Structures are given as C-alpha cells and as structure tokens.
Amino acid sequence: MQAEDREELEAHVRRKLDEGDSKGAVTLALRGYGPEIFGLLVSLHRSEEDASEVFAVFAEQLWRGISRFAWQCSFRTWAYAVARNTSLRYRRDAHRRAKRNAPLGEGLVMSELAAKVRTETLPYLRTASKSRIAELRDSLPAEDQEILMLRVDKQLAWSELARVMHEGDEALTEEVVKKESARLRKRFQSIKERLLELGRREGLIDPESAVNKRQG
C-alpha cells in the first residue's frame, strides 16, 4: 500500500470513528491493513496455522480495544502494536494455549472478516519466493527480525516503530518514544552489520561492498 493510500485509509477510519461507527472503522482497517499484518505474522511464526490463529485473536483484540484508541499515533501503528503484542503472548504461551472466549455479536463479524482476509492473502504468500538473504534474516533473534520487517518491509517511521515495539507499563510519553527511537536506530545499525557479515560469509555480498557500506 502506497503512502497516499494509507493516508486515505486513515482518514476514512477516523471519519467512521468520529461518526461512532466502530464496526465500520475496524472493518475498514482489517480490509486495508489486514493482508500486510497477516503477512508479518506468517513471517514471525513460520506456520500458516499459528499465524492464522494469532491473526484471529488480533482481529478480536482490535475490536475489543477500539474504544481505547485515542489517535496518539496512526491507526496502522496501533494495529501493528496490537498484532505484535498478540504474537508475543502466543509465542510465550506456546506450550499452554488458553482457550479464547467465543466471540459474540460484532466480535463474530470481525472473526469472519479475519478469516476472509487470511484466505485471500495466503495464496500470495505461498507463491512469494524466498531469497537466501531472507533465510539469513530468519536466523536472527526474533526481536531483530521484527525490527527489520517493521522498519524495512512495512516502512514504519522510527517513532512508529518505537510505539509498536514498546513493552511494559511505562507510559509512552514523547520523551520515552524519542529515547526508544534512538535505541532502535542503534539496534537497527547493528542488525544491518550482522546481516552484511553473514552475507559476506555466504558469498552473497562482495567483501569490498560490505566494507564500503560500513564506512558510508
């Protein structure tokens, strides 16, 4: 999705919320951002079944939390934060799955929409070729992979990335976002250098090119 398309979608979502149409807002968001978020979950979990389950929970959490969303960031950023937190909880509870409450009312509609998004997105994900560089990325720690995917693939700004990656009870003040953004920039540089080194060892990157990039 291009930047102008995202801006238009954000405006439509905001209009729906201003009108008190929470269902319409979440429906628009899931249809617009659902495919890219589901793609991220598939990459993180490396299992269509697990990613599908996480995406279903994410859709419900988006619906249940919409009343608390206050536009301190874009809806897209908030949706990614909800998706990442849902994914983290799922991974941390890998051996003890808590049964979800059966969705009722509007929640059922969101679950059905989530299933539709997954069904429409999976064929594309299955046919996308995986490069050796992508395989090297998969060898990195989970958080490093998340940072790369969100910053490079999803093109989140540093402040957006800081909000998505934020954990804990500390309030997300502007000062905290600024501090976290700086930390992530430093971490991102370290990840890039690690990938360059791995690529050089695999013969995928010219050694001279790697040196020049580190010096540039």
Image (tube, rainbow, N blue to C red):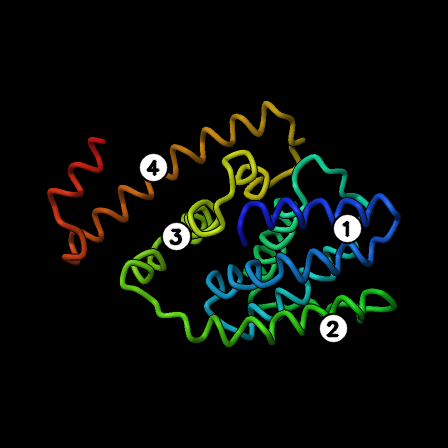
Q: Position of residue 129 (x, y in %)?
A: 36, 70
Look at discs 4 and 3 and give the one toward the viewer: 4
Tell me if label 1 and label 4 are in contact, CB under 8 Å.
Answer: no
First in sequence, mark 2 or 1: give its number.
1
Q: Going from the N terminus, do you reach mark 4 or mark 3 first? A: 3
Give the amino acid at mark 3: Pro
Q: Which residue is mark 2?
A: 112
Give me the residue at 87% from left, 47% from top.
Answer: 19
Q: Residue furthest left?
A: 208
Distance between the alpha carbons at the discs numbered 3 and 2: 33 Å
Q: Nearer the viewer, mark 3 or mark 1?
A: 1
Rounded to the nearest whole Å, what is the CA distance between mark 2 and mark 1? Answer: 18 Å
Asked if marks 4 and 3 touch (Cβ < 8 Å), the reply is no
Q: Residues within 10 Å of mark 1 (few under 14, many from 20)?
A: few
* Residue that carries the numbered disc 3 in the rendered image: 141
Task: Mark 2 and mark 1 in contact? Answer it, CB < 8 Å.
Answer: no
Question: Which residue is denoted by mark 4 in the rendering?
Answer: 189
Secondary structure under badge 3?
Answer: loop
Q: Residue at x 53, y 62 (%)?
A: 41
Q: Identify which amino acid the numbered label 1 is placed on.
A: Gly
Q: Spatial distance from mark 1 to mark 4, Cα to Cα?
A: 34 Å
- Specify whether 57 is left or right of 2: right
Give the secondary structure at mark 1.
helix
Q: CA distance from mark 3 to mark 1?
A: 29 Å
Instruction: Identify the mark at residue 4; answer none if there is no mark.
Output: none
Nearest to N terminus: mark 2 or mark 4: 2
Residue type pointed to by label 4: Gln
Looking at the rendered structure, the kind of residue marked 2 is Glu
To which quarter of the image does residue 33 belong? bottom right
Q: Position of residue 3 (x, y in %)?
A: 55, 45
Q: Compared to 11, does 60 lie above or below?
A: below
Residue identifier under label 1: 65
